[in-house]
Image: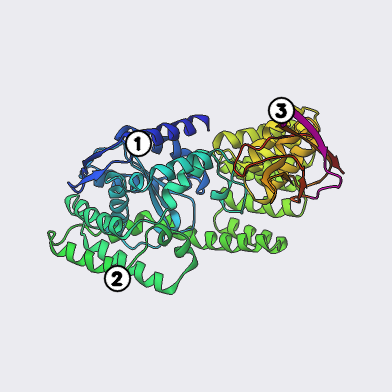
Amino acid sequence: MKRTLQTFVLTAIAIAASGCATNAVTGKRELVGMSQEQEIKVGQENYRPMLQAQGGEYDVDPELTRYVSQIGERLAAVSDRELPYEFVVLNSSVPNAWALPGGKIAINRGLLTELQSESELAAVLGHEIVHAAAGHTSQRQSRSSILQGVLLGAAIATSGTSFGDYAVGGASIGAQLINQRYGQGDELESDKYGMRYMSRAGYDPQGAVELQQTFVRLSGDHEADWVSGLFASHPPSQKRVDANIATAANLPAGGEVGRESFESVMAKTMAAKPAYDIYDAANALLAEKKTAEVIDKADEAIRLFPDEGNFYALRGDARYVDKDYEKAIRNYDSAIRRRDNYFYYYLQRGRAAEQLDRYDSARADLEKSNSMLPTGLAYFSLGNIAAAQGDTAVAIEHFEKVAQGDNELALKARTELARLDLSANPHKYILKRCDPDESGNLVVSIKNDTGVIIDNVGFVVEFTDADGRPKSEARKIASQLGAGEVTSVNTRLGPYTSGSNCPVRITSATLVE
């Protein structure tokens, strides 16, 4: 994570010094947000975490990935900018595709199952190649948004239940890069030049017209998966359809369509689609804690397609909710036997082992999970384990990684930190603010930023008396402060000017269990 943040800091600094250059795709003079070396670096450092955060690689059908890569390389070979392009299929039912700076391109299983031909697939990949080659993703990162990405990358994402919500560091920054909504100009540009690449590579550009017509129809139906997936960052429109028709009219007629070849390569994945549909429905039931139904559906999905590790992990998730941790661990074992390179299985198996006080095996799994994708859930459990074993310093280190943010897990981490560290470092958990009253006297506001009740909050006001001599005066809050509660004390000391340095030091506090 440190390396990723350093990369983004350097990128942010470099933006200030960047100027204009000719876009290799469009030939236009444009403001350059990153150098090519920086784009490649950002893509490389975000790519692997993004794969994990977006569902992992779809490895049960390696022939499909080879096929997609071959088509991608065929298009990249005729593109206007040479980059280290790489293509991957992700194991997600959400219909989506994305490009990171530097040419790292992914397409989800859920989008592939909606396509009808190789030319439509070429249209998707060509479009994403242009986003990378024309620098659309990097251009959207203004100086402020890159710096914001650095700050967000330092925090652990802990909210929600989707895979992306677990991400930290490179993956959380990468998510910003791929999830931002492209402007209409970028989309029209990517359609236009992507179709040119299709034609150069020997594909029928009419596939891009048919693809956009399908997308416009689906957007009118407001299908949730499409709205949350491809359409969130790649908004379709009739204007894009019309523009694609005009572009196709100016390109050589004909070209490869590849319906039969596409259907042949997609046969295994299409045969497995009913099992994934059942799995997706079961995941929705898991959110409602209908665990018996979830297990039944997971078993049905396994009967239809026993090679998919997610189906076994789903059984484990249901049993984890039921607090049947032994069976949950066996289910995660089954998932890992089928896919041993996916963070989520190790994360969940480690959390289940933690519940059984099997700290050594839990720590090993949680650390392995973090090596693939650092997550708040893993760090929180590692903090619990260190605290249970009396290693307060390590526990604090883990909880501090989780405590940033305003979600439920961050609040729990701050609560654990308060239990471990409040008496030694009260200033880290109690916020202060200084304001003048109408007479210019100093008013100190104190906020309990933990999730627990605290008492005996003490602070020292440091000031200069009328004779110019430095003074300090100790004060104490007379009442307990609940979680998030704020209280104010008029010190009657002054004068204090609004906006001046707050001359207050938090000195003590105790936890009310």
- Report which quarter residue 146 is drawn in: top left
Describe residue 246's horizontal placement relative to residue 108 as left or right.
Answer: left
The kind of residue tagged 3 is Asp
In which quadrant of the rendered image does the C terminus lie? top right
Q: Are marks 1 and 3 in contact (CB under 8 Å)?
A: no
Q: Nearer the viewer, residue 404 or 199?
A: 404
- Left or right of 13 on screen, residue 416: right
Q: Earlier in the sequence, mark 1 or mark 3?
A: 1
Residue 210 at x, y percent in the picture:
28, 66
| Viewer-nearest of discs 1 and 2 | 1
Q: As shown in the figure, which amino acid type bears the numbered disc 2? A: Gln
Residue at 22% across, 57% down: 192
Instruction: Specify few, some or many for label 2: CA neighbours under 10 Å numbering under 14, 14-19, or 20 or more.
Output: few
Q: Indicate whether 365 appears above or below 512.
A: above
Which element is circle 1 on?
A: helix
Instruction: Decide: is 223 above or below 188.
Output: below
> What span is colored magenta in the figure?
465-482
Measure how far apart labels 1 and 3 are at the Cα level.
48 Å
List the residue tagged with mark 1.
Answer: 16
Q: Which residue is mark 2?
A: 238
- Secondary element at tag 3: loop
Residue 429 on image: x %, y %: 72, 39
Q: Residues within 10 Å of mark 3 (few under 14, many from 20)?
A: few
Q: Position of residue 375 (x, y in %)?
A: 60, 41
What residue lies at 31% left-to-right and 45% top-to-bottom?
Answer: 132
